[in-house]
Image (tube, grey):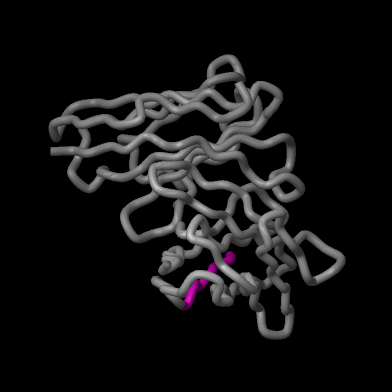
Amino acid sequence: AQSVTQLDSQVPVFEEAPVELRCNYSSSVSVYLFWYVQYPNQGLQLLLKYLSGSTLVESINGFEAEFNKSQTSFHLRKPSVHISDTAEYFCAVSAPGNQFYFGTGTSLTVIP
Amino acid sequence: DTGVSQNPRHKITKRGQNVTFRCDPISEHNRLYWYRQTLGQGPEFLTYFQNEAQLEKSRLLSDRFSAERPKGSFSTLEIQRTEQGDSAMYLCASSVGGLANYGYTFGSGTRLTVV
């Protein structure tokens, strides 16, 4: 089975400052890794994913995440956050199967 | 329609009543998933369909929960004899084939409150 740990439940950060949201996973098999974002009263939206290849993956809105197999991590980073980045962020893992295992989420609050 | 649609958005029901939620996936997506999300937690997998076949249902929370996708298009999730502990957001997602290559597309969810 797989599991995901998001180490920070809440992360406040000032606008234009950098941010890192941490995610560690556990699995006995190779996995795929995802970050989803959930804005208030909305469904989850795929932010980025790692399937194979380059360990650094990027999203279109400036987020990036790096897959680190030795540390079993997939931390999400952004060099300069914006007010509109305020949301709940979920890390998820999937083995070659059909279900995701989600972390408990990190609430990112960007302070003006 | 370019997204996954869920109805109703909100449902308040009395304990012991039955409720049914509907999910309309993206039309070309053959896989449909149901998740439950409680406050402060990530989504928890319940069940999924490939076309009309329910391929995994062991994670449904109890025998009070059931799901159908009779024609391989929309799906319904029913909870019988609701309990206060059933209060949660119920999320539907759909995908084309194996999810890993595409990720899911989630709907906005149905928020259930059992009073």
Q: Which of these two is toward me, A55 or A10?
A: A10
Quarter of the image with the C terminus of chain B in it? top left
B17 on left or right of B101: left
Q: Residue A37's spot in the image, x, y percent?
A: 53, 54
At horizontal 63% and vertical 70% (from top left) the residue drawn is A78
At horizontal 64% and vertical 33% (from top left) the residue drawn is B31
On the question of residue B48 being in view, the answer is no
At horizontal 58% and vertical 60% (from top left) the residue drawn is A92
Q: Residue A31's spot in the image, x, y percent?
A: 71, 64
Residue extent of the magenta highlight: A1-7
- Compared to residue A72, the image places residue A50 above or below, namely above
Q: Which of these two is toward me, B111 or B70?
A: B111
- Compared to residue A5, the image places residue A35 above or below, namely above
- Compared to residue B84, the image places residue A82 above or below, namely below
- Compared to residue A104, the image places residue A26 above or below, namely below
Q: Residue furthest bottom?
A: A70
What is the total number of numbered labels drawn onto the structure image?
0
A53 on left or right of A56: right
On the question of residue B17 being in view, the answer is yes
Q: Is residue A40 magenta?
A: no
Q: Residue furthest front?
A: A112
At horizontal 44% and vertical 76% (from top left) the residue drawn is A8
Q: Residue B66's spot in the image, x, y percent?
A: 40, 31
Q: Which of these two is toward me, B69 or B62?
A: B69
Q: Residue furthest top?
A: B71
Q: Residue B54's spot in the image, x, y percent?
A: 57, 31
Q: Is residue A5 magenta?
A: yes
Quarter of the image with the N terminus of chain B in it? top right
